[in-house]
Image (cartoon, helix red, strand yellow):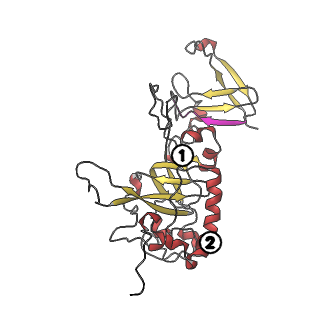
Amino acid sequence: GLFLSGLVVPGASPGDEGSWRYLRVGPVLGWTLQHRGAGKLQSVWLRTARAWYLLRRDPPCAPAPSFRHCWPPPGASPGAALAEQHFLSSSVAAAYGRVQRCPPRGPAAAGAAQSALYEASDAADGAVLAVAASVRLSAFSLLDSRGVAVDLFRRLPAGLLPAGGAVALGATDEAGNAPPDAASAAAGLRLVGQLMPTAAANAGSADGAGEAAPKEAWPARLWVSSTAVQEWRVQPAPAPAGPGSPGPGGGASFCVWVRSAGCWYELHKPHPRMQGVWAPPGTAGRPLSDALLPAAFDTGEAPPLGA
């Protein structure tokens, strides 16, 4: 098992270094990141059968010199992003998950010609919705297995990861070349970004609008790394009001949702490394396929038949 050794600091007099004592405990049964308040994103809690131990990263506490190269805690930076499966199974997930679900597919996706394409994805989507709420992701990057930023919409032009190892129809890399197989086209494609919290501690409402929220009430924006991307969808978002905005009837922008093996992500501001490769469809230069058109555009009307 994994054991922990270090100096134990009395809570009543942390400044009295003469009272510190060396301790060895274990085996370690679990851990969680300090994601709120002092030391957030820098301190870690470890659990043994007898107690929780706070590994602080604020003076006078620090990792041992021989351990410092191992210290960046998962979730503290893009290079040490918390794995999706660890995030979803942790107690902190409730501070970031929402009940809002991904947008439904448009009517064109329900046609007979499309049913086989979406059947496996619908089964996977049902499993995801049964166990996890959606989360919002900011400063996001879409990376391939080499850690290189990629164009999601070139790799998955039909909005889905192809089943059975097939290459997605029309898939290309960033240079416009057709990939030789599905592995080089989309397998290993993952999201890395910062989770946007949904509620403040001790706030009076779910959106954090309660009275007298304490200082540093909001949880840290943890960095998370998703499992392999499976699908993306778009949702119309009203254009913001204010000076320079198009105003009523002036159009809308698209919000992009991405599904991994375990969660739906609503994407917000991209990371600077995505400059030049993040271009959601729906513009004149990159039109959106009608099979991916959101249901919000369906008027429910049909042309009159006969005289």
In this view, the residue in front, 38 or 179, is 38
Write down the region rendered in magenta: 29-36
Tell me the SS state at disc 2. helix
Q: Label 2 belongs to which residue?
A: 163
Could you say which disc has been placed on residue 190 in the image? none
List the single residue furthest toward the front: 307
Amino acid type, callout 1: Arg
Question: What is the x, y in percent for residue 112?
Answer: 58, 78
Question: What is the x, y in percent for residue 135?
Answer: 52, 48
Image height check: is 198 above or below 103?
above
Q: Label 1 belongs to which residue?
A: 98
Closer to us: mark 1 or mark 2?
Answer: 1
The answer to whether the residue labelled 1 contacts the one labelled 2, judged by CB atoms less than 8 Å apart, is: no
Amino acid type, callout 2: Ala
Image height check: is 45 above or below 264?
above
The answer, for residue 147, to whether it is visible in the render is: no
List the single residue furthest toward the left: 243
Real-space CA distance between mark 1 and mark 2, rounded to the nearest whole angstrom: 29 Å
Residue shown at 31%/61% (left/top)? Answer: 251
